[in-house]
Amino acid sequence: MGHLTNKLWAVVPAAGFGARMRSEIPKQYLSVLGKPVLVHTLERLASHPDLEGIVLALAEDDPYWPKEREQVDVAIPVTTVTGGAERCDSVMHALTALAGQASDNDWVMVHDAARPCVRNSDLRMLTETLRDHPIGGLLAVPVRDTMKRADYLGNVQETVDRAGLWHALTPQMFRIGVLRRALRGALDDGNQVTDEASAVEAAGLQPLLVPGHTDNFKITQPEDLALAAFYLQCQAAGQGRAALSGMDDGG
Ligand code: C5P
């Protein structure tokens, strides 16, 4: 497996609250298997051998991080910035902080704090697939259910052809210069993009979809915590088996 010729950085937007969790504590600080979701996420990202450092965007006056950071067992620097009103503002703040140390051609992987179950093998697949790409791309999975468009009362208006439809996951990985210009353009246009790829698309460029797996889901609702614990345990068990047999099972 070849290494990237340009440096690789990670940005983790973690400045949201996650109202749909109906919890007093923001969802990235809820515990799964004895560790906050965010700590799982940071350790997963940091396991990528090419990663230089992580910039974490936190809510202003986040009271949780100073205590939790002691639990984070990673060998690379984790620096923090204050996030913004929307996810795209938080990512922009992190990119601005990176500008001093990263070059425009370096890579940045933007990964939701609330996706702790991304597989190590999917992270490697993403970076390996994009290593010579001029722009970047994202992990995604094809839509598997039949898709309906509803009116505001919940009545079906039409069935949408699912051919060619994908769920956009994270990490979304772009050349830093491309992403900074695209996000700046989106923010200037008042276009509140919900992912990085949308900003890059609005700039007239075409990100590449890299097939990932559905265990890389975003914790959104209370019942998702048990699902995340289940996937993390399955992945750990798979890695244990793979280590014994000397094989990589993709966990
Ligand atoms: O709310 P949602 O699940 O879509 O948020 C996706 C990610 O963006 C989360 O990790 C959240 O903490 C982050 N976010 C942020 N700044 C905001 C809003 C969301 O960093 N203003």
Image: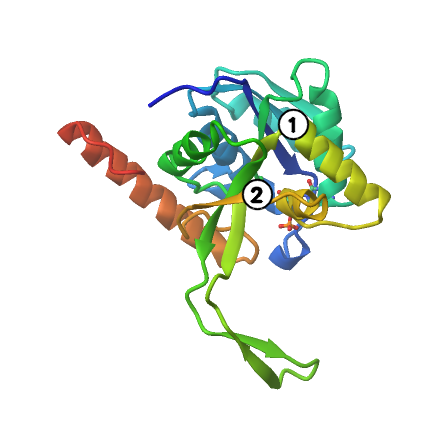
Estimate the spatial distance between the alpha carbons at disc 2 and disc 1, rounded to whole Å.
13 Å
Looking at the image, the residue that sits furthest to the left is 245
Q: Residue at x 50, y 57 (%)?
A: 166
Question: Quarter of the picture for ligand 1?
Answer: top right
Q: Which residue is mark 2?
A: 207
Q: Is residue 95 left or right of residue 48?
A: right
The image's mark for residue 163 is none
| Label pair 2/1, CB-CB below 8 angstroms | no
Mark 1: secondary structure: helix
In the picture, residue 59 is in which quadrant?
top right
Q: Which of the two residues, 229 or 241, is positioned nearer the viewer here?
A: 241
Vertical position of residue 240 compared to residue 112: above or below: above
Q: Which of the two residues, 155 or 107, is positioned nearer the viewer here?
A: 107
Numbered label tally: 2
Q: Which of the two residues, 241 or 226, is positioned nearer the viewer here?
A: 241
Q: Is residue 126 left or right of residue 64?
A: left
Vertical position of residue 156 compared to residue 80: above or below: below
Query: Can you say which quadrant of the picture contains the C terminus?
Result: top left
Give the percent coordinates (x, y) of residue 181. 75, 33
Does residue 32 appear in the picture of this structure? Answer: yes
Q: Residue at x 72, y 49 (%)?
A: 193
Give the percent coordinates (x, y) of residue 226. 43, 53
In the picture, residue 62 is in which quadrant?
top right
Q: Which residue is mark 1?
A: 176
Q: Residues within 10 Å of mark 1 (few under 14, many from 20)?
A: many
Give the percent coordinates (x, y) of residue 95. 70, 27
Compare marks 2 and 1 and give the one earlier in the sequence. Answer: 1
Q: Amino acid at mark 2?
A: Pro
Which mark is in front, 2 or 1?
2
